[in-house]
Image: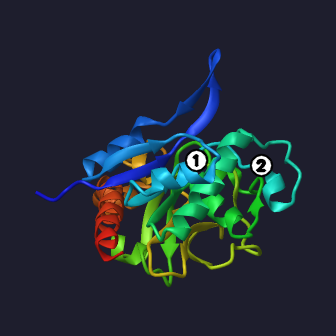
Amino acid sequence: MQEKPFIGISMNFMKLGQFNQFHIRDKYIEAVYDNGGLPLPIPCFVEHEDIKAYLLQIKGLIIIGGMDYPPRLYGQTPHPLSDIMTERRAESDLLLFKTAMELKLPILGICAGLQLMNIATGGRLIQHLETAEQHLGEKYHPVMIENSRWLSKIFNTDRLIVNSNHHQGIDGGFVGQGFTPVAWSEDGQIEAIEYNCDQLVLGVQWHPERISTYADNALTYADIASDFGMINRHRNLVFSYFIENARNAATQR
């Protein structure tokens, strides 16, 4: 039996009830564990040596979704509809990403995690999409893949149906240095980015950890029927590929 690799997962830091808490949804933990990894949640620490010590124990890093990153990180003031995360989480996530890149770890960014990747490499976000209603509320919609290195291997198709719950997105005029957009929604919003390096560094705007079935009002019946098999396998395709890549990359370093 193959040894299960430790996969680091970032966490939220927020006030829940009376107390500040480190927090992570079960779907991330289960998606990693169900696909052959040992999830290692990483608290929001902001000391480089502490973050590095965590990352030296893992084979790959996942940066999870969450609230909005402070727009000061890309030179803007907050939009009235912004729901900004704590500075502690934002600082920790930046440090996690930059240190993981230094260590050449495979990285998967999910929703806000994709946005963090873009910010960390000098890119900007659109703070509130004009088409936000098409992306909020766990909506399902098509994305088209083009010139991708990693998504094409994961799915072996150029069209996916994905779930969506975000009101911000990458500003296509300010994509982070080193990143290439590789998937788009029908309204032209960037849905995935990949970094130009040997390691797997992939950001997706949707939530593969919780894709299981379509919402009642997702799409037409024809769309659901044609893509139902892929939707049911979507989560496992993403996480099994990432974990296997992390395992193999570790043996090559």
Along the line of sight, which residue is nearer the eye, 243 or 68?
243
Q: Which x, y percent locates residue 236?
A: 30, 56
Give the distance between the C-alpha atoms of the residues marked 2 and 1, in whole angstroms.
19 Å
The circle drawn on residue 165 is 1
The three-letter code of the residue at mark 2 reads Pro
Q: Residues within 10 Å of mark 1 (few under 14, many from 20)?
A: some
What colouring style does the render use? rainbow
Q: Secondary structure at mark 1?
A: loop
In percent of width and height, residue 239 lies at 34, 58
* Residue 9 location (% of width, % of height): 46, 48
In this rendering, is residue 197 above or below 73? below
Count of labels in the image? 2
Q: Is residue 118 above or below residue 47?
A: below
Q: With 10 as the anchor, is 70 left or right in this view?
A: right
At x 34%, y 72%, the residue is 249
Q: Residue furthest left?
A: 1
Kind of residue at disc 1: Asn
Residue at left offset 50%, top offset 84%: 147
Query: Most extreme residue toward the front, as rendered?
Result: 49
Residue farthest toward the bottom in the current orientation of the protein: 147
Q: Which residue is mark 2?
A: 70
Whether residue 166 is visible: yes
| Snapshot quadrant of residue 156 | bottom left
Give the secondary structure at mark 2: loop
Q: Residue at x 85, y 47 (%)?
A: 78
Farthest residue, direction right: 77
Q: 186 or 59, which is in the foreground?
A: 59
The answer to whether one can see residue 225 in this image is no
Front tag of 2 and 1: 2
Q: Residue 12 placed where, x, y %?
A: 58, 38
In the image, is residue 183 above or below residue 38? below
Q: Earlier in the sequence, mark 2 or mark 1?
A: 2
